[in-house]
Amino acid sequence: MLINHDIRRTLDAVVDLLNTELPDLPALREYVRRHDFSGIGALREPDLAAVRSARDRFIQVFDSQDARATADLLNALVAEAGTTPRLTDHDGYDWHVHYFAPGASLAEHLAADGGMALAFLLVEGELERLRRCGAPDCGRAFIDLSRNRSRRYCDGRTCGNRLHVAAYRARRREAAAE
């Protein structure tokens, strides 16, 4: 599966959106800064509500177990965003496609580009790459881009390592009790 730089950045932004609390405008502004969105004007309360709504729809996509239902969700998301595919080569990146219309709001930007990036995964038969962390107390979203689709944790250094250490200690306690 070939994922270019722009699609990867978009998928990363969608995953981060799913895993980010957005209690207020400063949190939304920090999210925008982290992902270096271009062409986003001043953010206001209606933007926060619209991005939260887009996030809820992305959650439905991640949690969907059926390709047809996922396609319906993505079709609606992308259509409502008013997609306008256009070629661009901004910020030192080679030619790539943006799907949001010029002047789009942040929520429309996310819905159009994020919806299309997820649609590409569906088209490639790769929806099983949309995952939730296997740690019982986590549940964060991630996209498994490993070659063999074996990733189970949102972050191997935290959730994965924590569970491996706990299993190791349990084995040691069991061995000591024998």
Image (cartoon, rainbow, N blue to C red):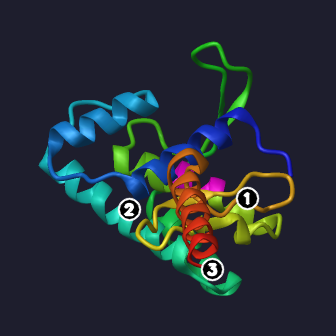
Residue bearing the label numbered 1 = 120
Please state which amino acid type lies under the numbered disc 2: Arg
Residue at disc 2, secondary structure: helix
Quarter placement of the C terminus: bottom right
Residue at disc 3, secondary structure: loop
- Earlier sequence position, callout 2 versus callout 3: 2
Q: Out of 24 and 81, give the one closest to the viewer.
A: 24
The magenta stretch spans residue 18: no
Residue bearing the label numbered 2 = 55
Q: Is residue 56 something that shows in the picture?
A: yes
Please state which amino acid type lies under the numbered disc 3: Glu
Residue bearing the label numbered 3 = 178
Residue 44 lies, in percent from the top left, at 15, 42
Q: Can you say whether 123 is above or below 102 in the image?
A: below
Q: Main secondary structure of the magenta part?
A: helix
In this picture, residue 139 sits left or right of residue 32: right
**Magenta residues (range):** 112-117
Q: Can you say whether 149 is above or below 20 in the image?
A: below
Residue at disc 1, secondary structure: helix
- Which of discs 2 and 3 lies nearer the camera? The answer is 3
Please state which amino acid type lies under the numbered disc 1: Phe
